[in-house]
Amino acid sequence: MTTQAAARRARRARRSAPGEPGLRDVLRRRRLVARQMSATVVLAGLSFLVGAGLLTWPEWLTPASLLFVVLLGVFVLRVRAMAVLSAVVVGQVVGLQLAGFTQFAPGDLILLGAGVLAAVAFVRSRDRLGLQGAASDLMLVDLRDRLVAHGRIPPLPPRWRVDSVVRSAYAEAFSGDFVVASRSRSGNLLEIVLVDVSGKGQDAGVRSLLLSGAFGGLLGTMPPERFLPAANRYLLAQDWPEGFATAIHLAVRLDTGEFTVSTAGHPPAVQLHAGSGLIQVLATNPGPALGIVASPVFGAHHGTLAPGDTVMLYTDGLVETPGADVELGIDRLMGEAERFVATRSGGADAVLDGVRAGDTDDRALILVHRD
């Protein structure tokens, strides 16, 4: 046996059997424990310094000053270390009170107790997700950026423009609406999918991130008419408790302007004809939302984008208002789109602002225009 082969075998032997922690995992856990212990000791020492300040300068410091130490722990400690730090802080205040060194106002004690409980609950919720402190916030920002990146429109030839905007409910970081786009290798076919995932906020955002990656992998790898059935099968396979989504799929030939639009439980697309000024709702005999039935049938509308025409895709957050008719919302949206086409100003953001749909639901709008 050669020396290199023996070394490889030795490395394999040092690795654990399946299901047991490997050497690297053990060392990593030990380093993590050591860092957590060091951080806990430092923060506990800082809390004692603050406690000494409570006795020396009571007119400047109150028990609420210890919340600063607890806040630092939120950024660097996991749940067990956070519990230890919280016990040290609370025990210190109780000890000073019982020993008669100082008397704290009830309001200060209530504020400190509430702050400690909130900090422990926050760290526990992050720890369940494997997240920690500021690094976890950076990871969430990265996930949001990835979701935005999936919706970037590929470069288009002259005389073609696509303008899109996605806004989340209550200006949250994540949206249940997302866009996926692809251009064929030949460059003649542009496909755009607008999806509205059930739910709002971070829960919907996590599902949007997963689906946008999967749909992005499907888009452009199969004929356009097979995309929605494939997306439906993928969504059914996830078996989510609240796992449905509506979608609209647009495929446009960039050489001729011919297009096909199909919907799955989604509001219909709208075409604005520049020559006649007609605003046409593209009825497609829509199929059910994705993730509900095993073998749905999705209808399709075939048309042509003449020079100057625009096709508009949108989600229900732009047209649905509690207590109001959806048709009125669609009429209002078409009016704003007509103004955009006539003035060539503002783009999708201006159309969305003009609709004034409010921010209680996620909203998305796409304008595909042929100059």
Image (cartoon, helix red, strand yellow):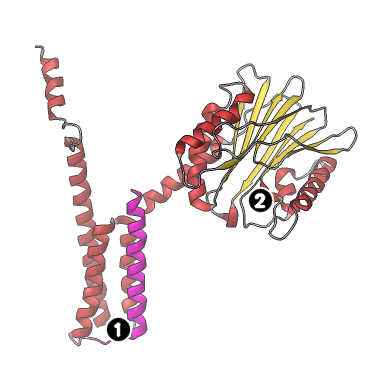
Q: Which residue is mark 1?
A: 58
Whole-percent x, y for residue 274 in the image? 86, 34
Which structural element holds mark 2? helix
Is there CB contact under 8 Å for labels 2 and 1? no
Which structural element holds mark 1? loop
- The magenta region covers 102-130
What's the amino acid at mark 2? Answer: Gly
Q: On the rendered image, what quadrant is the C terminus found in?
A: top right
Give the CA distance from mark 2 to mark 1: 54 Å
At horizontal 67% and vertical 40% (from top left) the residue drawn is 164
Q: Is residue 212 left or right of residue 96?
A: right
Q: Which residue is mark 2?
A: 317
Q: Tell me the quarter of the picture where residue 283 sits.
A: top right
Q: Across the whole image, how many numbered discs are drawn on residues?
A: 2
Q: Residue furthest top?
A: 1
Q: Tell me the quarter of the picture where residue 365 sits.
A: top right
Magenta-colored stretch includes residue 124 = yes
Q: Main secondary structure of the magenta part?
A: helix
Around disc 1, counting alpha carbons within 10 Å, would you say few (fewer than 14), some (14 to 19), or many (20 or more)? some
